[in-house]
Amino acid sequence: MNIGVIADTHGLLRPRAAEALAGSDLIIHAGDIGQDAVLDRLEHIAPVIAIRGNIDTSGRAADLPDTRVLDFAGHQLFLLHDVKTLDPCAAAGCRIIIAGHSHKPRNDVLDGVLYFNPGSAGRRRFRLPITVGRLTLLPGTAKGTIIPLDLT
């Protein structure tokens, strides 16, 4: 299963981000969506599962949950916007933690858990890269990839 992962669009879905997510079986948006149009455009690419970020106070995003637990290809995934607010009890048993918020891409395994942040696909913050991510899930294996977006 190929899952496109995006976060921190803040109302901007760049054409390059949409291109990078093409071919996904599913898209996860890890919050700070910003505008309903972002979800609408992503839904034309693949089914979308999203959570609310700290700026998501209106539109469809305001009604999204703060966290979600998903089960795909034998893997449990825990979604939240800010990994600093992670409740270990809520994520117990999950081997993949997906977060956004920091705008910093992350693809690290700690104590057998994959911590994955696709970075920000929205407006540039500081000197951080503009990125999206991809998770490839196979039985017994999960691989995360950060995809830098060429904005030239």
Image (spheres, grey):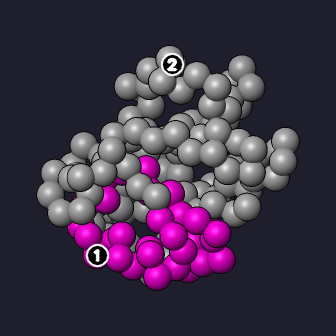
Q: How far apart are the alpha carbons under marks 2 and 1? A: 33 Å
Residue range in magenta is 19-48
Horizontal side, residue 127 vs residue 58: left or right: right
Please report the residue visible at 60 percent of the width from the left and 78 percent of the height from the top.
Answer: 22
Q: Amino acid at mark 1?
A: Ala
Is residue 144 magenta-colored?
no
- Is residue 36 part of the magenta span, yes or no? yes
User: Is 145 on the left or on the right of 19, as rendered?
Assistant: right
Q: Amino acid at mark 2?
A: Pro
- Which residue is labeled 2 in the image? 88
Residue for point 84% across, 48% down: 139
Q: Quadrant of residue 70?
A: top right
Dot label at residue 138: none
Image quadrant where residue 38 sits: bottom left
- The percent coordinates of residue 76 (x first, y second) are 64, 39
For residue 37, the mark is: 1
Callout 2 touching callout 1 (CB < 8 Å): no
Q: Most extreme residue toward the top, as rendered?
A: 89
Q: Position of residue 65 (x, y in %)?
A: 33, 44
